[in-house]
Amino acid sequence: MNRAVKKVRHNGEEPIGAVIGRTFILLLVCGVAAFVLLGFKLFDVQVRRHGELEEKAIEQQTRESAVKASRGTIYDSGGKALAVSATAETVYIDPYMLKLNGENAADISSHLSELLGVDYDSLISKFENTKQRGLPVKRKIEGEEAASVRRYISENKLTSVYLAEDSKRYYPQSSLASSVIGFVGTDNYGLEGLEAKYDEYLTGTDGRVIRLKNVAGTDMLFSDYENYFDAENGCDITLTIDSTIQYYLEKHLKQAVADFDASGGAAAIAMDPKTGGILGMASLGGYDLNAPFDISEEIMESISGLDAEGYSAELAAARQRQWRNKAISDTYEPGSVFKIFTLAMALEEGLVDENSTFYCGGELSGVPGRTGAPYHCWKAGGHLTQTLSEAVQNSCNIAFINIGLRVGAETFYKYIDAFGFFDKTGIDLSGESASIWWSPEVFTEADNKTQLASASFGQTFNITPIQLVTAVSAVVNGGDMYTPNIVKRVTDADGNIVLNVEPKSVRKVVSEETSATVRGILENVVSQGTGRNAYVKGYRVGGKTGTTTDTVKEAAEGIKEYKVSFCGAAPMDDPRLVVLVILDNPSAAKGYISGGNMAAPTVGNIMSEALPYLGVAPQYTEEEAKQLNVSIPKLQGKTEAEAAAALEKAGLTYKTVGDGESVTDQLPAPNASVSPGTKVIIYMGQPRPDAEDVSAPNLAGLSYSEAKRALENAGLFIRSVGVPATASGAVVSVQSVPAGDTVAAGAVIEVTLIDKSIQGQY
């Protein structure tokens, strides 16, 4: 029997079943809503913000430290290290850990300031920002300095100070090739020179170590979790630079700057003409690569009185000057050295030959477009009639204007382009400048030949030293123009070749026949002409002098400053070496200003050491053999008769002091190099008496015999380089020990002899 269910009300309230039903529905709705919200939250946390939160978790639970990569090594052509990296350490502070662990900022700052020589206030300021982590205090420390910090951390159980492995750049050869190699900044990125140019090869990739840390922020001991990512070291670079030739270059360039007071500095390049490889490149003054921001005391003193703004500006300018590579960045008027190219193009075009003659009366009028004064030769009255070779030997401007006019503006311009003077050479160094030339429309103007006339003897345009030495190499090597290079190869950490730089021939500029003729004429310049002071015994040296003024500065400021130069090659039958030397603003007080007087002997001195080093055997004439410097034999223990025989064989004479049976001492010392005919002092049966240091006499301008006598009177000995001592015009130009400097009694002083008869010649 069906019974109807009755809804029961209690005291007028809603029935219990309805309340339960509605509650259930409400709970169901709320539950679903909660689960939907939770789902969205889980999606947000686990999917959308997964990367962000995972990164935060890792940051809170792990400590990451860098494994510094080592920067690649730079080697010279023989494998000698010029730039290396070594392990160092950097001190960091952690303000967050300081606050977390309640460490004392003032005490730590005081101790670190004392240990590291850093500013106390700056440390306190860094510690105030407690949200910061890993702020550097002092970079690249080592040795006892690093050990003292490590002890301080350990003894005080500090968590807010730590050391991290770093890498420090060293330059074992100090200032050698400084303008080429360059340097790095505190972050180990290249700032100048090859360090900057090849930074992408030299820079490695840092590795990482990731470890778990505890709530105090220190590493968890005995944790199985540790990830190690290896550092990848940078590539090594091998240069074409030979550090020995670089040393010769810098030694003699520095000597020349001092001897001739070249206030504007100097530049020199040594090139292998067969490949375009740079064997040496120097700009003076150089700087210590290990302290590239240090300036000489002289300059610092000169700017010390300036206000803050002026001091800062002058300091920055001084640094830029010392870093500047004058050999590629500076432009200049080459002067008579440029006659090499006028000669080569005229020979190549068949417009002149060795039988051609030229007349020079001292001046030349009638050049189209020339107004005012005529062109002048450096020799008043002129050279009169001369052959082509004599015109080059005499460096005759009038002859070369006539040669240039024969070539013609269009053809001349074509050859200048072929010799590479309109383009940068493309050398693998930063900072190469471009030349300054006339436009083709101006240069080839039909009614104006003044540009052609001036260019034919190297004036009123600007080129760079690297352009000139590259073009001269092409003229003397048989006519092949090479792109100059300074890097030979790049290898990775495993020794695999990453980049191999082969000699790159750009074009043929003149024929083998023209090249041979030019070489013969340039050799005559050294044997008979204005380049006589580049003479080197036993070697066939050729080259050309140059002397110019800074015409821009003269016109703007009325100041006449000279640049003197010489570009030489040897041996001229098969050139192995081309050397260019430029001295900027030498002093007239130091001698007649000319390339022949100042730059030529400098090149000769470089060649005299570089050629034997390169294995080029000297071939002495009979007369040259008689004038060679000789090595003093060891005489101790010999009888007088035995000593006399040894000295006579070496071409030396002697005098005795004492009357013992055997030699007990001698002056000069064994193996010292002296001029032939030097009188050696031998002490018989008694020690050599102590002698006080002596003052070097002033030998400038003296003949060889006069200089020898002056040194003997001072108890000193002589050795000579340069032109033959028997040459009628030979006088002392410079001496290895400056006049007035003290030197040990019995020392040997080297003198450079020049031919004074070329004074007045350019």
Image (cartoon, rainbow, N blue to C red):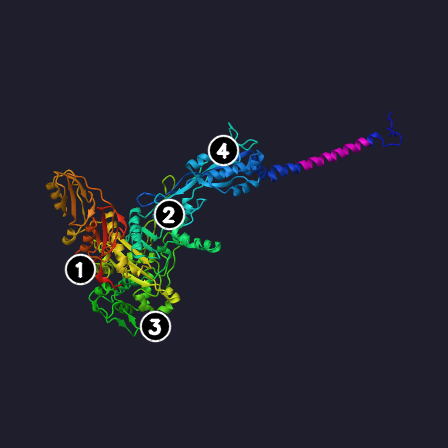
* Near-viewer residue (627 or 114): 114
Residue 48, image quadrant: top right
Q: Quadrant of the C terminus?
A: bottom left
Kindly indicate whether the residue at mark 2 contacts the one at mark 1 (C-beta within 8 angstroms).
no
Residue 448 marker = 3
Looking at the rendered structure, the secondary structure element under dot 1 is loop
Question: Crowdedness of circle 4 by 10 Å Cα count: few (<14), some, many (20+)?
Answer: some
Question: Crowdedness of circle 2 by 10 Å Cα count: few (<14), some, many (20+)?
Answer: some
Separation of disc 1 and disc 2 at Cα? 43 Å
User: In the image, which is nearer the foreground, mark 1 or mark 3?
Assistant: 1
Q: Residue furthest right?
A: 11
At label 1, the amino acid type is Ser
Kindly indicate whether the residue at mark 4 contacts the one at mark 3 (C-beta within 8 angstroms).
no
Where is mark 1, residue-wise?
728
Separation of disc 1 and disc 4 at Cα? 76 Å
Q: Is residue 211 left or right of residue 282?
A: right
Q: First in sequence: mark 1 or mark 2?
A: 2
Kindly indicate whether the residue at mark 2 contacts the one at mark 4 (C-beta within 8 angstroms).
no
At label 2, the amino acid type is Asp
